[in-house]
Image (cartoon, rainbow, N blue to C red):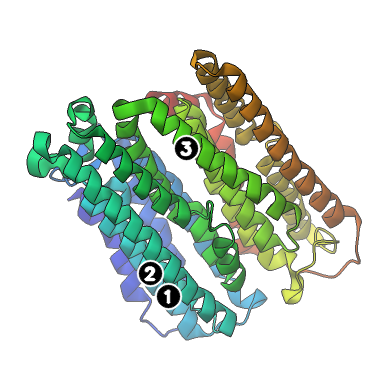
Amino acid sequence: MMLALLIFPALMMFAVSFFKNKKAKFLLPVTSFVILLPMVKLFMLPKPYALWGSYLVADRLDTYVLLVSSIVGIGVTLALLTLEKHVRVSGNAYRRFYRFFAVFWIGLIVSILANHMGVYWIGLELATLSTVYMIKTNHTSAAHKEAWNYMIVGAIAISLVLFGIILMYASAKPVLGEDAMQFDLLLAHAKEIPSPFLFEMGFAIATVGMFVKMGFFPMNLWLANIERASFYPVAALFSGILESAVIIGFFRFSKIAMEVNYSHLFVFVFVYTLLTIFIVSFLIFRAKDFMRLFSLSGVEHMALIALFWVSGGTFAALLHFGAHAFLKPALFLSTGVLESNGKYRIAGALRGYVGKRGTMFWFLVSLFLLAIISLPPSPMFFSELYGFGAMITVAKESDHMLAMIGAILFLLILLSVIFYRFVAVYQSMKYEGKEEEKHVYTSEIFALLLFALALMALLLPQTFSYLRGIA
């Protein structure tokens, strides 16, 4: 029954997307609000809660990720109301966007709630394929080209994940039989796996696939190119929701890998994420427009989340995940206004706003820009504080403490480069360039306010307690 309630709003959205009446445009965001209702109900149920046997099981981590994703979905649909005010979009393309958003949402629910590696892969593939068509709603040659690029890169990444799953399944099958596909049983019997090397190989291959899907090394630019070519709400969905389905898979697999061989896991993830942040920091420094700047920054934050998670900073990783899921879509949705008339100009982007809506817009965007670089009291300030604290704890317990401390200092230097770039961008937006009149609409302000309130909710003591409970 609960599973039907979770899927019903998406089915309703899919059906409404075929209505050609102009009023359907306002009905579609309502279906997005309806998604939140069963999510809140699921959030309040005792955990673990079986939705479909042992295949779909909700726990505290699942429901947190789904609740965050549903709030992001509402913000995106609010901004979609004024999409045609900023870019050229036909009514048919607008309805098709919602049609595939509904399919995307079903895939997201399946992948996040999956307690089975095969079911997780199916949900992730469904979410991936639906986003290809959402990219193509922008009828330009660049968008169509990037949609094909995404199809190719996504196919490579998802194939790596599938091959990794096969190896992990094969490593545990002598102990668990056909149940070796279940996350909970794999975690419970991780130390009994007779072929740990085979499992670690499978984990490494699957992790590379998941990391590639999030724009990690060696494919750092494909995600930024896609988000630049597509409509800005698509970029918000990528950063705030699709990456949630990918990172939760990493969380699940890495918890098992920690039990198999923690030191191998930590070194592999630490080197991979450090290399990713090293490349991304200089790409951010050279970014010339908002979409690329925000997209590359998202890769950096997802790398930090993975690093904090394997360092034992589960609380820090989940807090950082929530902050990123709200901040990055808010900034992507703001680009429709910041890039006035399709001109990708950073200088003066926060100038030229009039009235209460204009004042509120530049104030909120300023706060989001400063929060994304972890200035207090941003949730990211606290998550990085706790996350780096967890890394120092790992370093103290390591046989190579000096090397670990040196690597952490190097990471902080790279983050300082990103910090400097964002401060320079903010100063240029606020104090340089010519003023051009820009229009802000009510639904856009409501979307940004929703994200601002969600960020404030992350700082509540009750939220901290809940996230520590997951840890």
In primary-sequence order, the first of circles 3 and 1 is 1
**Residue closer to the observer: 309 or 336:** 309
Q: Which mark is residue 133?
A: 1
The one nearer the camera, 77 or 197, is 197
Residue at 31 percent of width and 68 percent of height: 12
Residue name at image x 90 percent, y 54 percent = 431
Residue 33 image offset from top left, x and y in percent: 42, 57
SS label for mark 2 = helix
Query: Considering depth in this image, is 326 or 81 the residue closer to the camera?
Result: 326
Amino acid type at mark 3: Val
Query: What residue is drawn where x is 62% and y is 18%?
Result: 402
Residue 449 percent location from the top left of the image: 62, 50
Q: CA distance from mark 1 to mark 2?
A: 6 Å
Three-letter amino acid code of the residue under disc 2: Ser
How far apart are the two marked residues, 3 and 1, measured between alpha carbons?
32 Å
> Can you see residue 41?
no
Circle 2 residue:
130
Question: Where, quadrant-wise, is the C terminus in this rendering?
Answer: top left
x, y percent for residue 403: 60, 23
CB within 8 Å, label 1 to label 2: yes
Instruction: Please give left or right for residue 124 compared with residue 411 in the image.
Output: left
> Is 407 situated left or right of 61 in this image?
right
Mark sitting earlier along the chain (3/2): 2
Vertical side of 9 occupied by 364: above or below = above
Position in image of residue 155 (x %, y %): 37, 66
Residue labelled with disc 3: 269
180 relative to 406, above or below: below
Q: Secondary structure at mark 3?
A: helix
Occupied quadrant, residue 85: bottom right
Within 10 Å of disc 2 (Cα), the crowding (few <14, some 14-19, many 20+) is some
Residue 120 visible at all: yes
